[in-house]
Image: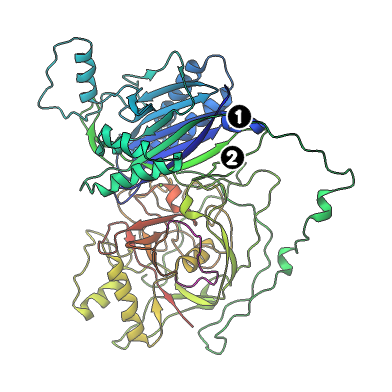
Amino acid sequence: MELQFEIAGNQVDGARDYQEDTFLITHLGQGEDANAAALLVIADGMGGHAAGNVASNIATSTFQKTFSGLYPTEDVPGALKQSLLAANDAIRAAVKETPALQGMGCTMVVALMSGARLWWISVGDSHLYLLRDRQLGKKNADHSYGGYIKRMRDMGADVEPDPNLSSNMLMSAMIGEEIADIDLSETALTLLPGDRVLLATDGLDTLGQGSVIQHSAWSSSARDCVSALLKAVEDAKQPRQDNTTVVCVDVKPREPRAAQREPPPAFAKLEDTAPDLPPPDEIPVLEPVGEGEEEWTPAPFPKRPWTPEEAPSPRRGRRTAIWGLAAALVIAGGTGAYLWYGQGAKRASGPAVPATASLTAVPEAAPGPARPAPETAVVGQEAAPEAGTHAVATTPASPGGPQNGFRDGLKGGGQGPEMVALAGGRFEMGGLATTLNPDERPRHEVTLAPFAMSRFEITFAEYDRFARATGRKLPDSGELDRAEHPVAHVSWDDAHAYAQWLSRETGKRYRLPTEAEWEYAARGGTSTLYWWGNDVGKGNAHCFDCKSGLHPRQPTRVGYFKPNPYGVYDTAGNVAEWVHECFHPDYNGAPADGSAWEGGDCTRRVVRGGSFSGASSAARSAKRDKLSPIQGYDNVGIRVVREP
């Protein structure tokens, strides 16, 4: 009997403020056989913050790329091992190039399903389960210390655990050095219709095997199974719950092949029905409002060429140790994706599809001049369009510059932050259909009215004036110059209160930007991954792997890098920025006018822009993150908007 696979995957953050797991689901079949073969890869990052993010993304993408180049093959175990070693080598190369990444690594579990056969390879403590007839069997080895003790006892050895060693201490992981232990299936496991295969990171250990069986057996589909297991993990409310990623595969009989359709009439041509698209310079431009106010002087809209779109990259935390290493590492998790390889095409489904395309590098950014007056800013990412495709044109706003910058006077004396007047217009918000992050979809058109945004991120000194006036505690800046560095250790509530105070002091309406306003200003009229292009390049921003030569554990002064085409500085990296909205899991139902999207999960507020401690993938213009609004963070600051 021919088989096919129904696959679903997702992940939750747990008690972590960020996600460092990554997973990829790659359909390897051709045409109608697309669902008859699949490669599933899960990596669980270690090293904490960006390091684990970088490691899991490097390992996942390298494994997938290597194996796809070898498949199909008669030697599946050999191809799996070759791909794993290539992923480990890629981690080694990244550490060599960026010494600050020393100590990063990941665990990994991979399954290849083709026809009725299942092969796997794994390193670490992630899981591969087979659920058959309500019996749950773990198929891959557990490379934790507890797993080692169990294996020894199963072999008849009289082994007593060392009380000084934690049972979840890792004895094998991928850290760019020789891998201590690899579990590889030399022969394939035969799959049967009705089987359910589960791949998961160790965050699923919160649930006992009985609970895993119960929630899996009660779920009628792979998608329902993933949702049920992740909900059970969250409902357990463990105070130190790790990130958790689950991929579920339902093995089903192959559906009968559909009868082949008659070919269309010879005279039917695709171009006969293709719509005519106007060139970008003929797209209607919105007239800016507020022209009567002298301070609002947006420049004319520049005519811009069509620009190609964006390209990919992806993120996790649990305290543990690697056998033979003195340092403790943090295991965590980040991004999911679906890939289809068949007839050269790639289709989006589920979390995302990382594609490849030639990327255009931009000149290296030299540090910008000091600002005229004190006031500045992980894997997932999306795929660049394939050759021959076109990005959706955007209607650019006025570029920022001295001619459209202004400050409002404060009643208590002095001036507010420097603002940039933006004329508003139309742009495409969110990631491509191929983005690795489902919360960046669907990509949708937004049309914005004019507004102004702070040219730089708010500095400690600017925030201090508000804090002293309102009796708030001054945030700690360590040894940073408060006049030149972006404020941090401020909650969303603090940022919101600061904007309200500016409104009272100036008589104008200040507030936090909406997500749409923030992304519009950050893109600067571009539609690439970063406002300067699709490649993070070197020296364009301050992030963990941005190669800027700056201190990797603290932000730099505001305005250090050159501004984007709208005259706005530091929208990528340095510190992330609070925006108005509560978190929505995707853009379905998002306002088309760029206004604040109320509702959502208000236990988390959205932050944008990435930071010095995050990976370059988190600095993409479309990237979204979510954090508790009542906490301050050392890598999150403030940018404000002013209405006309």
Tell me which residue sits at (31%, 37%) in the image: 214
Residue 171 in percent (x, y) is at: 26, 24
Residue 270 in percent (x, y) is at: 81, 49
Farthest-out residue, right: 267
Residue 302 in percent (x, y) is at: 65, 69
Residue 83 is covered by the magenta coloring: no
What residue does disc 1 label?
29
Q: Is residue 386 above or below residue 557?
A: above
The residue segment tinted magenta is 585-596
Residues packed near mark 1 inside 10 Å, few (<14), some (14 to 19) or many (20 plus)? some
Q: Is residue 496 above or below residue 168?
A: below
What residue does disc 2 label?
356
Indicate which disc residue 410 carries. Answer: none
Give the spatial CA distance, label 2 vs label 1. Answer: 19 Å
Viewer-proximal residue, 61 or 364? 61
Mark 2 or mark 1: whose residue is earlier in sequence: 1
Residue 591 is covered by the magenta coloring: yes
